[in-house]
Image (tube, rainbow, N blue to C red):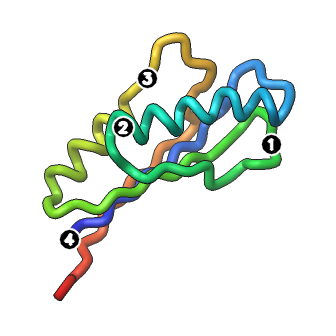
Amino acid sequence: MYVGTLSFDLLLGDVRSLKEKRSVVRPIVAELQRKFAVSVAEVGGQDLHRRTEIGVAMVTGTRDTSATCWTGASGSSPPGRRWSCCRCAAGSTLMKTD
């Protein structure tokens, strides 16, 4: 079993309030969940208006499936986006199961 993780540090555009930030972050999280069938959450920068960290995780049976998903997720860019990626870190871990 393979567990893959991906972390995005995003710099948001012209965002002036936490409410406005939610309106930018929520569609990003929903799109990643819909398009790649992964677990996604805002994991950092909750108190900052113009920055956020989004964590993504998945469990798969093959390393190739995980690598394909991460390549697609890290390269996806919806049209009309209001953010830019400052840092993207991916990792995969081989886990032994019985």
- Whole-percent x, y for residue 15 in the image: 78, 24
Say what secondary structure mark 3 lies in: loop
Q: How far apart are the two marked residues, 1 and 2, measured between alpha carbons?
A: 24 Å
Local crowd at mark 4 within 10 Å, few (<14), some, or many (≥20)? few
Q: Are marks 2 and 3 in contact (CB under 8 Å)?
A: no
Which residue does the numbered mark 4 point to in the structure image? 1
Nearest the eye: 34 or 25: 34
Image side of residue 51 versus residue 36, left or right: right
28 to the left or right of 24 = left
Point out the tag, 1 or 4, that comes first from the N-terminus: 4
Viewer-nearest of labels 1 and 4? 4
Q: Is residue 12 above or below residue 38?
A: above
Q: Which circle's residue, 3 or 1, is located before the other in the chain?
A: 1
- Amino acid at circle 1: Leu
Report the residue marked by disc 2.
73
Q: Residue at 56% x, 30% y: name it.
A: 27
Q: Earlier in the sequence, mark 1 or mark 2?
A: 1
- Count residues near mark 1 (Cα–Cα under 10 Å), then give few for <14, some for 14-19, many for 20+: few
Q: CA distance from mark 3 to mark 4?
A: 29 Å
Amino acid type, label 4? Met
Place residue 34 in its image quadrant: top left
**Residue 49 x, y percent position in the rendering:** 80, 36
Q: Amino acid at mark 3?
A: Ser
Q: CA distance from mark 1 to mark 4?
A: 36 Å
Residue at the spot of label 3: 77
Circle 2 — which element?
A: helix
Position of the N terminus by quadrant: bottom left
Residue at the extreme right: 17
Q: Residue at x 38, y 27 (%)?
A: 76
The residue labelled by disc 1 is 48
The front one of 9 and 58 is 58
Residue 43 location, x and y as percent?
62, 55
